[in-house]
Amino acid sequence: MHYFQEFINRKDTYSVKWDYAKTVFKSENELLPMWVADMDFHPPEAVTEAIKSRAEHGLYGYTFIADDMKETIKKWMKKRFGWEIQNEWLQFSHGVVPSIGKAVQGLTEPGDKILVQSPVYPPFFSMIKDNDRELVNCPLEEKNGKYVIDFHAFEEKLKTGVKMFLLCSPHNPVGRVWSRGELQQIADLCLKYEVIIISDEIHGDLVFQPNKQIPIASLSPEISARTITLVAPSKTFNLAGLQASAVITENKDYRRALEKIDKKNGVSMLNTFGVLAMQAAYEHGENWLEELLVYLDGNVHLVDSFLQEELPQIKAIKPEATYLLWIDCRETGLSDAELNKRLIEEGRIAMNPGTSFGEGGSGFVRMNIACPRDTVQEGLKRLKKALASSSVSS
């Protein structure tokens, strides 16, 4: 586990997280980046070796995805989630967000209503609006530091003629792992109102004990037939820049619709290194992942203890999954603008503002803790510097 402690200098590597933060946050200062969702850890050694081997081979021509890749993903889904899928259910994409875009374009029409649950990953909004669909929001409810679904409101929204529901499972940024009961209620209502489910399960491997990730499509054949599940090794194994993901659906009509969109856009294959990395990660990365989860859990506890002792007016929503902490700053009494100004100018730390996640995000920030413990501690010091003088604590 020592390799998670190693600090790796990512500056001047065209890293969005490290080299683009000053541009995104409009700052002249050097910022400690704890925002965009990638990790500051090396991936499993098998991934690096697979890429090195192909680099040494020296030819980077067109690369297809063979059946053994499908078998690898099939085995991963069975072992990690108890979900039996078939090879023919699998398609491949450059990422989960492009897959959401394809599903929106292929399975709905301009003007159709698509439901989301804010606060949620910002591309959920843009994939709807940029494709000229109508965004329908059913915000999550916060109860005693935990987010839940108001199922009465959920059904009322579906009644308005919603065609598609974008499910974030586990949920980013609030860190919920939806229970079987919650997923079954979602499924039952979507079946009742004939709503297509697009389930973004990119964080499904990053679940803390005793929680258990349940793919919503695994609940029943009926719900499987109405669901497209999106998965990727990118968050799990820190491979986001290699742009490789999988799309899983039993529904033949859905698969044909997605293929048609790919054909229209001239998309036919993935990046060579992305293919190799994805297979190596799923075949050989499980032990690395188990150690990662233990390390991340330690970072969660570090943040929670620090806030309780040093910044009691700030609270981290306890995550059931992901390496992204949803931090409640509302008791500081600061406006969102002042909160973000203090973080950038006084703390010199870059975290995602809660307002970017839509309704329910005001007064929050999202902190990425997928980094060495020393970096987390430095981030907490900067957070204290920025917020210790806020109105409640002063």
Image: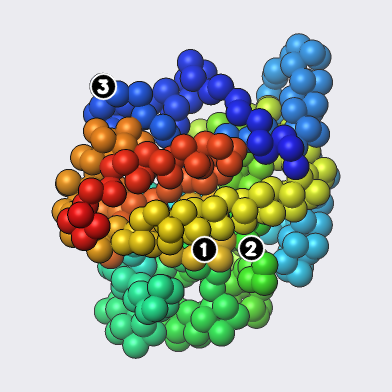
Q: Earlier in the sequence, mark 1 or mark 3?
A: 3
10 Å neighbourhood of mark 3: few (<14), some, or many (≥20)?
few
> Mark 1: which secondary structure?
loop
Q: Quadrant of residue 222?
A: bottom right
Q: Which residue is mark 3?
A: 28
Q: Residue 218: image x %, image y %? A: 66, 73
Horizontal relation, residue 248 to residue 2: left or right:
left
Q: Which mark is residue 93?
A: none
Q: Residue 73: image x %, image y %? A: 75, 52
Horizontal relation, residue 157 to residue 333: left or right:
right
Q: Quadrant of the N terminus?
A: top right
The total number of labels drawn is: 3
**What is the distance, in whole Å, between disc 3 and disc 2 at their CAs?**
37 Å
In this rendering, does residue 286 appear at all? yes
User: Where is 147 relative to 98, above or below?
Assistant: below
> Which residue appears at 75% of the width and 62% of the height?
80
> Mark 2: which secondary structure?
loop
Q: Which residue is mark 1?
A: 319
**What is the distance, in whole Å, between disc 2 and disc 1 at their CAs?**
8 Å
In this rendering, does residue 358 appear at all? no
> Which residue appears at 67% of the width and 72% of the height?
210
**What is the distance, in whole Å, between disc 1 and disc 3 at their CAs?**
33 Å
Kind of residue at disc 2: Phe
Q: Which residue is mark 2?
A: 208
Q: Earlier in the sequence, mark 3 or mark 2?
A: 3
> Which residue appears at 40% of the width and 73% of the height?
145
Q: Quadrant of the C terminus?
A: bottom left
Residue closer to the observer: 44 or 181: 44
